[in-house]
Amino acid sequence: MMTMKLCQKFKTTTGDWRIVVFGKPELLTSAQLNGLLIKLNVFAGELEHARVHPKFLHSNATSHKWAFGAIAELLDNAVDEINNGATFVKLDRIFSKRDNTPALLVIDDGGGMDPDGIRKCMSLGYSTKKTNNTIGQYGNGFKTSTMRLGADVIVFSRAYRNGRATQSVGLLSYTFLRRTGQDDVIVPMIDFDISKHWPEPILYGTQDDWSTNLKTILEWSPFDSQDDLFQQFEDIGSHGTKLIIFNLWLNDEGVYELNFDEDEEDIKLRDEAARLSKLSKRAADTQAHISHRLLHSLRAYASMLYLRKFKNFTIFLRGKPVEQFSMVDDLKHKEVVIYRPQVSSVKEAVAETTLGFIKEAPALGITGFNVYHKNRLIRPFWKVTAEGHSKGYGIVGVLEANFIEPAHDKQDFERSSVFSRLELKLKQMQMDYWKRHCHLVGHQMDPTYMRKLQKTSDVPHQTEDEQFDRSFSGPAPNPNLDLSSSQMGTRSRTAYSNEAPIVRAPPGFGTGTNQEVACGDDSRPIDQICDENIELFMRCERYVQRENELKYTVEDLEKQVAETKRKCAELSSRLELLRRQKLVR
C-alpha cells in the first residue's frame, strides 16, 4: 500500500529544519516542527513518511463548494491529455455491482498513467503539469474533486512507457479508512505488466504485500474478484484512464446531491432544480438563460467551460456529445476592446475583451463578464457593477485573463492589485459601451454622451493624439451625417487608452443641432460615484504608466553613465600607460 506523501524535510547547517509543504518551503525550528498537526514518523533522524489523517481528505475536499466545480477538475485532467492524443472524455451514471447504488463514471482515451504516474496522481500536492498549455498546476485537483463528489474512488489506467505496457488499479477510499480506524491515508494499489499476452503482477515489495493490496481493493470496492477488475479495462483500450466515484454524497434531505433522473441526457444539481420549480413565469424566463442554467445543468456548464472550440476532442455526457457554446457568437452589436495591464511577471500582457448585448436585450437584464484563464472558464457572468446599478443591463463580455492566477478551486481568482485593476477596467469598459450603444436596444441616449456629441460637432478638427483608437473599414464617416444602424451595429475594435474617445452620432441623431435629449433612466448618486471612481482610477493609471516610463528612462541613463565611466577608466589607463612608456624612453 502507498502512504500519501504530503511533505519533505531537510536539515539545514544551522540545525533548523526546512520543511516543504505543498511545494512551499518553510524554515522551522525543532520545537515548531514537533508542534505540526501533521505527525512525522522519524527513525534515527531520517524521515520515513509524512502521515496525514483521513479526516484531512474530507476537509480538503471542501475547497470545492460547488459540485460542478469538482467535475470540471476531472474534465480539465482529460482536456490536458489532448497533448497525449486524447480524443474524448465520457461522463455517465453507472450502478455499483455490490449494492446497486449510483456511481459517477469518468473515462478518457489519453496517455494513461504508468505505476509511477498513478502514485503521483494519488499523492497530495504533486503535479507533473508544468507547461503553459495545461490547465492543472497544483497537483491537488484529483483528490479534492473526487472526495467532494463521493466518499470513494477507484482508478483504472493503462499506459505505454519506455517500451512497456502496464495497467494499474488504485483505491482511494474514505469509507475504508474511517471504518478500519486508520490514522494514516493508505492507498492500496496493484500493477500489471501487459507487454506479453497475459498480465503479470508487478511487485514492489513481497508477494504477500501485493496480495494484501488486492484483497483490500476487492473488499472495499464495487468489484468482487480479480476478473471483475480486469473487465473494467475492456472499454479503456490500449491507453487511457477510468474513474468510478461511488458512495456519492447526499444532501441535507438525505437524497443524492447529483440528480441523474430528471434528464436522461444531463446531470443536474437536485437542490437548485427544486428551487427553480417555485419561480414565477417571468423569473423562469430569466432562469432559462444559460447564465442561470449553468448553475444547475452540467451540460450547460460544460458547453461554456472552454473558450475555444475543440477540433478533435469531444465531451460526452450521458452518451450524448456536449455542443460547445460560444457566448461571443450569441452577442449583438459587438465591440472588441484591448487592455494592456501593467504586470511585473508578464512582459507584455494583453487582454482582448469582446462586449455586446445579449440577443434577448432589453427584455432580460443579464449582465457580467465571462473570464477565462488558459481557455478555462473561471468566473462566469461576473458582475463588476453594484447591485441596483441602472446602467449596463444586457451587456455581456468575454475575455481570457492569463495574467492573473486562479484560486485552487478554479472558481475565482486570487485577490491582488492586478485583479483589482482589472475589475475597475472592466467596469469602465461596460460604462463606456453602455453610453455609446444603449440606444441600439431601445434605451434612450445617455445625456452625458449626447453632450459630448454636441461638443464634437462644433470642433472642426482633432489632433491625432485626441482620437480614439478605433478601426473602421473604409474612410472615416462624416460626424455631421446620420449613421445607419447597420454601421453602428457592426463589430468594432477598440484599443483601450486613457484618452477621451471621439464620439460619433448614433442612428437617428444629428450632431448639428442643439437639441437636448432627456434620459428616462435618471442618474442616481451611485452612478456618479462609480463614474468618479473610474476617472480617479484612470488618472492613477496614467501616473503609474508615467512612473514606469521614468523608471525605464532612469535605468537607461544609469546604463549610459556606467558605460561612460567604463570608457573613461579605459582611456585613463591608456593615458597612464602612454605616460610611463614616454618616461622610459
Image (tube, rainbow, N blue to C red):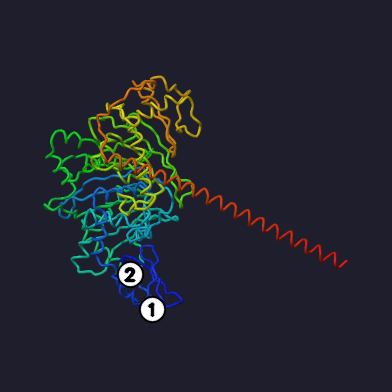
> How many neighbours does mark 1 have within 10 angstroms: few (below 14), some (14-19), or many (20 or more)?
few
Which mark, residue 144? none
Q: Disc 2 to disc 1, how far (Cα)?
A: 14 Å
Decide which of 488, 2 is in the foreground and name it: 488
Decide which of 255, 419 is in the foreground and name it: 419
Q: Position of residue 40 (x, y in %)?
A: 32, 73
Q: Where is residue 463 in the image (x, y as percent from the top left)?
A: 50, 31
Q: Position of residue 480 (x, y in %)?
A: 42, 20
Q: Is residue 432 above or below residue 28?
A: above
Q: Where is residue 297 in the image (x, y as percent from the top left)?
A: 22, 41
Residue annotated with mark 2: 50
Q: What element carries label 1?
A: loop
Is residue 403 left or right of 529 when viewed as pictured?
Answer: right
Quadrant for the C terminus, please: bottom right
Q: Which residue is drawn at 12% across and 53% down?
A: 254
Q: Is mark 2 on a helix, strand or loop?
A: strand
Q: Residue at x 41, y 19 (%)?
A: 481
Residue annotated with mark 1: 45
Is residue 542 left or right of 371 when viewed as pictured?
Answer: right
Decide which of 55, 439 is in the foreground and name it: 439
Residue type at numbered disc 1: Gly
